[in-house]
Image (tube, grey):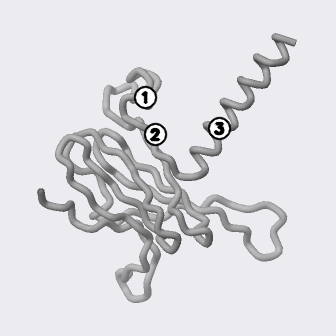
Amino acid sequence: MKVMMQGWLTTAAGAALMFAMLAGVPAKAQDAAPAAAQGESAAGGATGPFVFAAPPSAQANRLYSVNMRNGEVNACQFERPEGSLVGVTRCFRRDASAQAGAPGTYDIMSTRYSGETGIFRVNAGTGQMSVCYVRDMPKDGGGVEPAVVCTPPSTQ
């Protein structure tokens, strides 16, 4: 009985963690793994760690990530091309506003506003915030292409 109970508790804890991740509860910087496990490249350049969150909109089929060290924002979504049995992960290009910024301790937050399709990028060290989202941006040569864009950081 004790073994079954431990297995159930482990499963319940894992399920709770998974539900928190799917609900957009942000990971915390202090919970990060050691640098070697966080995506440190062999050359010593910082490539991670990352935190992930989904916007609160039930219609948004999108997941955002923020590099905790430099604030770079990415966004991807699931799509299933017509006539295809298998879907694809579509990631959007980054506008200059979503590129890496000053070194810091960044996190990602989602609001509770049900219509929101973006996220907040927050700098825990400075308190600055910016809103990031996917928007159709003009392409060179005409037309538009969706890209991840961010508002300028708030001033404190």
| Sequence-first tag of 3 and 2 | 3
Residue 87 in picture, x, y percent from top left: 74, 62
Residue assigned mark 1:
31
Marker disc for residue 27: 2
Q: CA distance from mark 1 to mark 3?
A: 16 Å
Q: Is residue 52 above or below residue 85?
A: above
Residue 151 versus residue 4: which sits nearer the camera? Answer: 4
Left or right: 72 in relation to 50:
left
Categorize mark 2 by other alpha carbons within 10 Å: few (<14), some (14-19), many (20+): some
Looking at the image, which residue is at 68% across and 60% down?
A: 88
Spatial separation of the CA atoms under disc 3 and disc 2: 14 Å
Residue 55 image offset from top left, x and y in percent: 50, 62
**Between 129 and 79, the one nearer to me in the picture:** 129
Considering every residue shown, the one lying at the far top of the view is 2
Instruction: Give coordinates of residue 86: x percent, y percent.
Output: 79, 61
Residue 16 is labelled as: 3
2 and 1 marks in contact (CB < 8 Å):
yes
At horizontal 61% and vertical 68% (from top left) the residue drawn is 58
Instruction: Say if 136 sits above or below 22 in the image.
Output: below
Q: Residue furthest left?
A: 156
| Of callouts 1 and 3, the N-terminal one | 3
Q: Quadrant of the C terminus?
A: bottom left
Question: Where is residue 126 drawn, in percent x and y?
Answer: 17, 46
- Observer-side mark, 1 or 3, equals 3
Q: Amino acid at mark 3?
A: Ala
Furthest-bottom residue in this view: 142
The answer to whether 11 appears left or right of 146 in the picture is: right
Residue flagged by tag 2: what amino acid is it? Ala
Q: Along the line of sight, which residue is nearer the eye, 4 or 125?
A: 4
Label 2: element kind: loop
Q: Secondary structure at mark 1?
A: helix
